Amino acid sequence: MEEEISLVELFDILKKHIRVIILTTVLTAVIAAIYTFFLVTPKYQSSTEMLVSHSSDNTTQNVTQQDINTSIQLINTYSDIIRNDVILDPVIEELGLDMTTKELREDISVQTENDSQVFSIQVQSENPYQATEIANTVADYFQKEIYEIMNVDNVTIISSAIPNVDPVSPNNMLNVIIGVLLG
């Protein structure tokens, strides 16, 4: 036999256990807030933007759609090179960073927009000024070394990174709301 429960009975059960429900909700919200505000180290992000252009010795030559598509496809290759030891090891040495190449690689991402010759090097760090310094140094070093690596001179820095003192993680409000909902 199936037993049915009415809405009135359901509300009676909820009313009977309201203190436990409220206590659990408040407790999980407090735990989430303590975790978010005191235990998690905030991460800051800085990014520098670069342009991949068609390199040509003859400046009067028209740039074709195929040249632009080739430049866009090169961004994937450049992304791999930027995150490679050949770029990151000298950056670590130049800045005197206390981290391994693997740790730095995890902090760096290369973002592109569809059908755009512009890409950005994004760096996350616990220090906003260090993130900026790393992003700018990686971009400078990549721009200098790409000619020797691929024999091309078609990368230009269009905007340098600036410190962003607003953390990108953790999302304090989202963590507290999740804590309340879990409660």
Image (tube, rainbow, N blue to C red):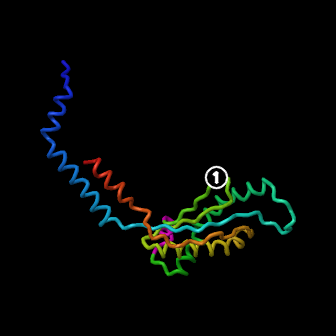
How many circles with numbers are drawn on the protein?
1
- From the viewer's perspective, is 13 left or right of 65? left
71 or 180, which is in the foreground? 180
Which quarter shows the N terminus?
Answer: top left
Instruction: Tell me the quarter of the picture where residue 81 sits.
Output: bottom right
Residue at coordinates 15% horizontally, 35% vertically from top-left?
13
* Whether residue 36 is situated above or below residue 11 in the rendered picture: below
**Residue ID at (39%, 59%):** 171
Quadrant housing residue 11: top left
Residue tagged 1? 114
Residue shown at 86% from the left, 67% from the top: 58
Q: Which residues are magenta?
A: 99-106
Is 42 in the magenta?
no
In this view, the residue in front, 47 or 146, is 47
Image position of 175 with respect to 150: above or below: above
Q: Main secondary structure of the magenta part?
A: helix
Task: Look at the numbered disc 1 and give the secondary structure of its residue.
Answer: loop
| Residue 100 highlighted magenta (yes or no) | yes
Circle 1 Cα neighbour tier, 10 Å, few/some/many (<14 / 14–19 / ≥20): few
The residue lying furthest to the left in this view is: 16
Residue 147 picture quarter: bottom right
Which x, y percent locates residue 152? 74, 68
Q: Is residue 75 left or right of residue 122?
A: right
Looking at the rendered structure, the kind of residue marked 1 is Asn
**Percent position of residue 24, x then y:** 20, 49
* Left or right of 9 on screen, residue 74: right
Q: Residue at x 17, y 29 (%)?
A: 8
Above or below — where is 51 with respect to 98? above
- Locate residue 172, reporting x and y percent: 35, 59
Q: Along the horizontal axis of the image, is 69 left or right of 177? A: right
Residue 72 in picture, x, y percent from top left: 69, 57
